[in-house]
Amino acid sequence: MSQSAYGQMWDAAQGALEDLLEDEYPTMQLHPQKDRLQVFQTLATFYLRYLKIFRALEEVYDQIVHPQKRRVVHQVLEGVMGRLVELKNEMVELEYSEFHYFDDMLQDFKMTPEDLEVPIPRYFVREKMRALKEREKMLAHILAKGGRQEHKTVPVQSMSVERAVWLLQVSERARQGRLRAHFMKTIRQEEQRRLQGNSSMLDPNQAATCIQKVWRGYRDRRRINKECLEEMIFLGMIPAQQTTPSPFQLHAQQVESRRHCVQEEHEAEYQRELVNIKESVWSVDGPDIKESLQEQIRQWFLECRDATGKFPDLPSPEDGGSASIFAQKTPEQVAAEFAAKEEEKEKNKKSKREKDKKGNDRKEKKKGKKGKMKGKKGKGDTEEEEKGWKMTPSNFLPTVVEGAKLYKEVWHNREEKQNFLQRFDAQLVREEKRLEVEEELRVQVDELMRQELKNLKLVVDRDKGKKKKKVKKSSKKKKKKGRKAGKKKKKKEKDLTAERTIESLYEELVMEGVIIRPKNIKLSDYIGEYSYLGTTLRQADIEPMPSLSDVRQLMALYGVLPLGSQCVHERGPLIRALLLTGPAGVGKQMLVHALCTETGANLFDLSPATLAGKYPGKSGLQYLLHVVFKVARQLQPSVIWIGDAEKTFYKKVPKLEKEMEPKRLKKNLPKVLKSIKPEDRVLVVGTTRRPFDADIKPFCKVYKKIILIPRPDYASRFTLWKELLQAGGAQLDPKLDLSSLAKVTDGYTQGHILQAIQTVLNSHRLNQQTKRPLTAVEFIPPLARQDPVYKEEEEAFKAWYSRTPLGKKRARAAKASEQEGHKKGKTKGGKSQKKEKKGKTKKRKKKK
């Protein structure tokens, strides 16, 4: 695609965004709504529309090369990302569930289930690729220096001499047998040729018909097999064969990668010209701007003098300086504002004096009355809130509106036919830099004009005494501020490692095994299919188990977007800790590594197994947590992984694990989590396969966001078998019945399926595929050796999740809806019975 095509895509996305903002802003001011289904429909429509815009803007930002346009797209893109996270949070609070289903709305929006995937912006990693490569080199250097290089351990089995001699003899005899068989085969072939040479010649017509028959049969069989294969691929019964990318696809990939290089070149040129243009504005336009500002302020002095009879006070730098004067205001309006401020100050002083004279009894009575009134108001407010739902104000809509306004004013109708290479616009840069220079010069001019105003007042007004008092007041205020600042400093925590550098702390954590290297796994590698029956099951009051596609979306919304974008993390709903729970083998650790790969985050391992025997005692633990969170904040984004998270909150520690001290972090972890601020892109991720062993109250206080990962359903198992077999090098023959494998493996997790594939697809079996294609029966024995996830274990996870805070809220909401349904049924029944009675009495009267 060309730059003009991406420009059209940007234009279409901005148009869709304007329509969406027009629809969304009225809902922010509406009265509370009572119908929950209607509320969810509105939230879901907004979510799907924002998702569509997000996908288009992400592609535009990745490929567009104009540096100034990219800044506008980036602003809108971050606003849309944050709004997506906010809408997801609204849906969770409305339905008391982390998982939502939109299959009934996809058809209306002409979307497929693949369009529900939350796209991960590529600039999260690409724009800091150099820093990531340097960090990788530093990590490898530290590991090599400490002798902790990661080698793949190959198991070596010891063998006796007799066993080795026996194996050598067997292999030598087999070699001689193969040679003898090959020799005999050649002799046999020579004898057959000699016998065929002595036979009589066939009739030419018979030979021609024989050749034609053989050729036509071969040609028709090949055509029919090809048509059958195409039909099966079209129906989805057989997966399509992996084809090598065409030359056009390879060329498109090269163009995309080349555009990234052009982006860097244009950005570097833009940054250089920003400095040069600012210097030229300073040298050329600076004196004129300074003179015009001085003349403007002098004129204001004279106008205020003529209007009020005295010279005004120039606003302080805190109030905006002279810029606040000329914000489309006349001198009389400014003088009136100053007079009103002085009157307010005098009134405040009088009111304070009157309050001091009154007795304490009256104050207490007033406070009691106010408290009662507040209590009454509070009750009324809660009643109003309980009656209906109202959308909370957004922190991202102003940025989206600002970006849309900037696009409409600057870029919507801008002619750029001459700017074929899409370099920066010097005129826009000069306008921006002129405003910056004007602001910097205004500060200097304000200082000069304050001195000039002082001289004018000394000559004309002669009010020296007033200024001395003001100076004293300001000094007192400064002293008071200094005292307050001193009090605040005492509350700050002590830095236990103030003398050490971040590099030395990083090296120490690497050597202790706390910082580990994340595996190169993308979130798209977590294979799972969309659940097509979610909405229908919920309508039948059956809570469906979430699909693996839903888990992938939640990881993108709760983990990747906040960690990748500083704006989303600061303004969006703050998530400090996330818990991934589910049976063994569902991919919890894989999701942690994918989270680090997609955002370029550091990975800290604070699992009880890694901390066993390290940093003993309370002081050692405090030091460890201080160092970990200090390095995590300095080198953000960071992911702090706690494996076997239930061990930290054990009800009873098993005897075998007492030496490990698994409950070391129980007291300190909640305190440290509170210290994570919105500016800190740090996320604590816990993984557990036995959450029911933990004390649920403190466990859920730490991990407020819980994602329950189930075993894969049929659709996910089918895609798993197909993708993993292809990744392992298997040739998917029509004889390999993947549907039967997906049915047979009901109850098995992704880890079980992967292990079975790895045991079957060894190098020897892969070489034999051409002669002996793979069959489904070969995978049954390795699967039979593993224990699946039984129903009892799945029910245990469901029961535990129902006791979490969100599960309890959902159960209460379900009970409340059932009670409302019963009440409505009773009222309807009562009304019908009354009508029947009235009808009977009327009939009796008529008969009489």
Image (cartoon, rainbow, N blue to C red):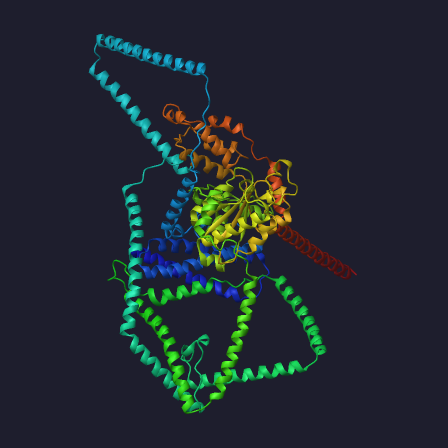
Q: Could you tell me which quadrant the C terminus lies in?
A: bottom right
Q: Looking at the image, which residue is at 65% across and 81% down?
A: 355
User: What percent of the width, then of the height, locates residue 591?
Assistant: 48, 44
Displayed quadrant of residue 708: top right
Q: Is residue 144 above or below residue 599?
A: above
User: What percent of the width, then of the height, locates residue 828?
Assistant: 68, 56
Q: Is residue 802 left or right of residue 51?
A: right
Q: Nearer the viewer, residue 337 or 46?
A: 337
Q: Nearer the viewer, residue 570 or 844?
A: 570
Q: Looking at the image, which residue is at 49% across and 39% down?
A: 716
Residue 617 is at least partly visible in this image? yes
User: What percent of the width, then of the height, locates residue 795?
Assistant: 62, 40
Residue lying farthest right? 848
Q: Is residue 184 left or right of residue 741?
A: left
Q: How many marks?
A: 0
Q: Nearer the viewer, residue 477 or 121?
A: 477
Q: Looking at the image, which residue is at 63% across and 66% down?
A: 381
Residue 1 is at least partly visible in this image? no
User: What percent of the width, then of the height, locates residue 675?
Assistant: 54, 56
